[in-house]
Image (cartoon, helix red, strand yellow):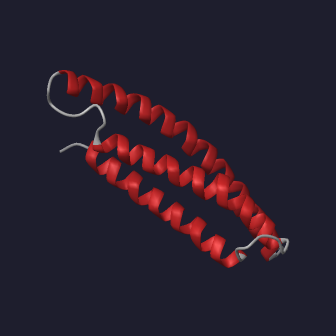
Amino acid sequence: GVSAVVPADAGRIVGRMLSVEAYLSLALAVLLFAAERGRARSEAATGHGSAFSTNLVLVLGALFCTVAGHFAIVPMMAAARAGQGAWSFAALHAASAGFFALKALLVCVLAWRLGPR
């Protein structure tokens, strides 16, 4: 038969998926940063832009959202779940979701900017 997934199991599954996503985001952000930094330097050398481009800001913003959302807030959520810390689990969950949504928006804007025109 079909077994039901209890909320605690669902939470663990989603937590694991988001953890994998965070580490993958870090790796991709480093690669994107290196590629975009080289492109921005080349454009700046020819006088057609800044070495610190808008695209670099978007990559760094997405990287910040990953670090803040996963590596800062998620450990605080675990503490809040255990009844520790100054913030409630719900408030921390909302902040984490907000960082995730902002990262998605930044990545979408970056993809739009880098896409074919």
Q: Residue lying farthest left?
A: 47
Q: Residue at x 43, y 35 (%)?
A: 32
Can residue 5 be seen here? The reply is no
Image x and y of residue 42, in percent: 25, 23
Task: Locate residue 116, reporting x and y percent.
Answer: 22, 42
Q: Is residue 46 toward the left or the right of residue 69 in the image?
A: left
Tell whether 103 sits left or right of 44: right
Q: 105 above or below 98?
A: above
Q: Residue furthest front?
A: 86
Q: Quadrant of residue 14?
A: bottom right
Q: Residue at x 64, y 71 (%)?
A: 93
Q: Quadrant of residue 56?
A: top left
**Would residue 42 be found to the left or right of residue 98 on screen?**
left
Horizontal side of residue 95 vs 40, given as left or right: right
Front-most of residues 65 and 111: 65
Residue 105: x and y, percent? 40, 60
In what quadrant of the picture does the N terminus appear? Answer: bottom right
Q: Residue at the spot x=58%, y=55% of the render?
A: 68
Identify the residue at image location x=59%, y=50%: 67
Is residue 76 among what the camera can see?
Answer: yes
Q: Which quadrant, please, contains the C terminus?
A: top left
Q: How many marks?
A: 0
Comparing 11 with 33, the one in front is: 33
Image: 3 above or below 27: below
In the depicted view, which residue is nearer to us: 89 or 11?
Answer: 89
Residue 45 at x, y = what percent?
Answer: 20, 21
Q: Is residue 46 above or below residue 98?
A: above
